[in-house]
Image: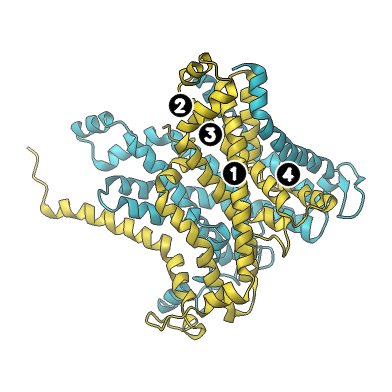
Chain colours: A cyan, B yellow
């Protein structure tokens, strides 16, 4: 393909992405250095927004909760997901049905999935709350700060583990049989085969899934907005929720933009190794 | 000398395997099943403690939802926005994906990586100015801007995926057509696209899911006129009046049902799309 043909083919897509993602992103960068609310003209204030945000306790609360959320959800998703994928790989019957069911939490509209999940934990009449009360356990899932955080983590495990199951299951299915048979001949137990043969083989997939899940957990919004709206108090306010609140509810777009840009800088920690890895893969495949 | 495995051990493993798999299956679907049951209960039964499992079903909640509420209006909005997003996404995505698959200059990789970068950024990093832009141009609460925004947000994933499908098609196919006098575009339309079925279906399903499920962007860009279902239902769910619970449950079922159907009939494509980027082929 000639160069001019290439540009002709990609231009509609590129024009749209530049117009609605790259340019708005640059505007956000600009706004982060200004005081601005809807209906006014932006006024340049240099780094003041950043200084204000970084000195703000509420910002660091959101940072720490977002990091806690990531630190708990990702390992739980990976361990549970791998365990289920391993069992699914051994199951001969009902696979199609099981996979359909597993897929539901992940593909149904997140707002709806979160709502139907959250009802089960409502005080008294929620089904899970009811079951717990039979065991003599009373937890204020929406009133207690720690319980609300735990609930959001449980939700994230319910919601995202299906994705881990599917990717790892696909990896197990595509695994060459020779090393496993060799291990079997050598008298390796099932768990030895898992630990010494399967996990090393699946390592690239673990890394891939972990990266995607970290990035998604970092920008979690829908589920927190629907379930707790950051409450009680601001115990479950994630960074994205705070950005939304500052920019649209308090109408300080400049400060909201500054938080956004700080979030972008934060995600680079994970993103840059990911981009480098992808670049190398693509160059090799070329 | 190896001892023969006792019978109970041969049985224990499959039993254990299926017990865990079914347990997770129940955990995964229980919230949906429970909601389905709630949506056909009388309000009294819905809040009964302990929960009632035998009740007289009623479709009152659905009647309220579809007839008295404006749910049909929002449902139509979602259908229009999703259909338009898929059509535009796939059209321009196929053009770009094909270009990216067949030309491998440096610019190709810069483009692919930039797309990936924007796919990974928190939405807020570029969604903040949308509201202002929408007000300024008079496109606030219209479907046009929402559709264009959804298409562009969806492009990075779409072009990466379609590119991988195009790369599986041998170059010789279009080269033969071009020797026979076809133009590049002609070869693309007449020779390449007809064999792109699976790729187009997979990418369409994922565009559809994104457009139909997205909450934040329509929440920023729409109001009572063009709001889509996720925005509408989030407002329902926020309502404090608990007598409305059965109606919200009916709304949840109505929103989830089309997706359940997609999962049932297109599981193969969904699995392929979800594992795309992780597992080759």
Query: Can you identify the residue that label 3 sits on?
Result: B162
The spot of residue B33 in percent (x, y) is 42, 68
Chain letter for mark 2: B
Q: Is residue B129 above or below residue B96?
A: below
Q: Which residue, given by chain and number where applicable, does mark 4 sit on?
A: B126
Q: Residue extending furthest top?
A: B179
Q: Chain of mark 1?
A: B
Q: Residue B9, percent across and down? A: 16, 52
Name the front one of labels 3 and 1.
1
3 or 2: tag closer to the N-terminus: 3
Task: Answer whether labels 3 and 2 touch (C-beta < 8 Å).
Answer: no
Residue A220, image x and y in percent? Answer: 61, 52
Q: Does the CB distance between marks 4 and 3 fall below 8 Å?
A: no
Instruction: Find residue B156 and report its image quarter.
Output: top right
| Relative horizontal placement of residue B236, taking residue B170 as reference (left or right) | right
Label 1 belongs to which residue? B87
At x 49% / y 53%, what residue is drawn?
A: A106
- Co-location on one chain, circles 4 and 1: yes
Mark closest to the chain's N terminus, 4 or 1 = 1
Query: Which comes before the other along the chain, label 4 or label 3?
Result: 4
Q: Residue at x 60, y 52 (%)?
A: B82
* Label 4: element kind: helix
Of label 3 and label 1, which has the lower sequence position? 1
Do the dots labelled 2 and 1 sit on one chain? Answer: yes
Q: Residues within 10 Å of mark 3 (few under 14, many from 20)?
A: many
Distance in Å between CA atoms under marks 4 and 3: 24 Å
Nearest the viewer among A57 and B222 is B222
Front in this rendered view, residue B28 or A262:
B28
Residue for point 86% across, 55% down? A38
Q: Which residue is mark 2?
A: B168
């Amino acid at each position: 393909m000639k160069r001019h043909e290439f540009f002709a083919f990609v231009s509609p897509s590129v024009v749209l992405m530049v117009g609605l993602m790259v340019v708005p992103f640059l505007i956000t960068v600009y706004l982060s250095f200004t005081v601005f609310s809807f209906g006014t003209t932006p006024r340049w204030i240099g780094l003041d927004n950043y200084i204000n945000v970084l000195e703000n306790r509420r910002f660091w609360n959101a940072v720490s909760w977002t990091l806690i959320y990531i630190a708990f959800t990702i390992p739980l998703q990976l361990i549970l997901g791998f365990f289920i994928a391993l069992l699914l790989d051994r199951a001969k019957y009902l696979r199609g049905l099981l996979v359909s069911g597993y897929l539901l939490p992940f593909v149904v509209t997140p707002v709806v999935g979160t709502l139907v999940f959250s009802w089960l934990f409502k005080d008294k009449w929620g089904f899970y709350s009811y079951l717990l009360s039979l065991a003599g356990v009373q937890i204020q899932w929406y009133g207690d700060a720690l319980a609300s955080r735990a609930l959001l983590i449980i939700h994230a495990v319910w919601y995202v583990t299906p994705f881990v199951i599917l990717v790892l299951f696909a990896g197990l299915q595509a695994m060459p049989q020779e090393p496993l048979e060799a291990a079997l001949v050598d008298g390796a137990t099932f768990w030895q085969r898992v630990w010494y043969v399967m996990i090393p083989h699946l390592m690239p997939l673990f890394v891939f899934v972990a990266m995607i899940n970290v990035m998604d957990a970092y920008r979690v919004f829908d589920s927190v907005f629907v379930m707790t709206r950051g409450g009680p108090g601001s115990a479950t306010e994630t960074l994205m929720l705070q950005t939304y609140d500052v920019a649209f509810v308090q109408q300080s777009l400049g400060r909201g933009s500054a938080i956004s840009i700080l979030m972008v800088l934060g995600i680079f920690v994970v993103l840059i190794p990911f981009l480098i890895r992808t670049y190398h893969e693509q160059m090799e495949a070329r | 000398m190896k001892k023969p495995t006792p019978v109970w051990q041969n049985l224990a493993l499959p039993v254990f395997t299926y017990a865990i798999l079914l347990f997770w299956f129940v955990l995964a679907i229980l919230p949906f099943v429970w909601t389905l049951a709630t949506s056909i209960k009388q309000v009294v039964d819905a809040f009964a403690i302990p929960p009632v499992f035998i009740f007289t079903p009623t479709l009152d909640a659905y009647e309220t939802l579809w007839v008295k509420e404006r749910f049909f209006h929002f449902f139509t909005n979602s259908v229009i926005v999703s259909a338009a997003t898929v059509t535009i996404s796939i059209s321009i995505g196929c053009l770009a994906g094909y270009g990216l698959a067949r030309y491998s200059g440096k610019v190709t990789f810069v483009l692919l990586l930039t797309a990936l970068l924007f796919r990974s950024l928190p939405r807020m990093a570029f969604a903040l100015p949308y509201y202002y832009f929408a007000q300024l141009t008079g496109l606030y609460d219209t479907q046009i801007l929402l559709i264009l925004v959804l298409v562009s947000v969806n492009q990075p994933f779409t072009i990466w995926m379609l590119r991988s499908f195009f790369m599986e098609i041998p170059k010789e196919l279009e080269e033969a057509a071009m020797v026979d006098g076809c133009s590049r575009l002609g070869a693309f339309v007449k020779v390449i696209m007809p064999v792109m079925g699976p790729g187009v279906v997979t990418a369409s399903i994922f565009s559809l899911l994104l457009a139909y499920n997205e909450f934040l962007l329509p929440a920023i860009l729409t109001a009572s006129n063009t709001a889509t279902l996720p925005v509408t239902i989030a407002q329902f769910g926020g309502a404090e009046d608990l007598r409305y619970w059965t109606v919200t449950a009916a709304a949840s079922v109505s929103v989830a049902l089309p997706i359940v159907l997609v999962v049932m009939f297109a599981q193969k494509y969904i699995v392929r799309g979800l594992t795309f980027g992780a597992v080759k082929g």
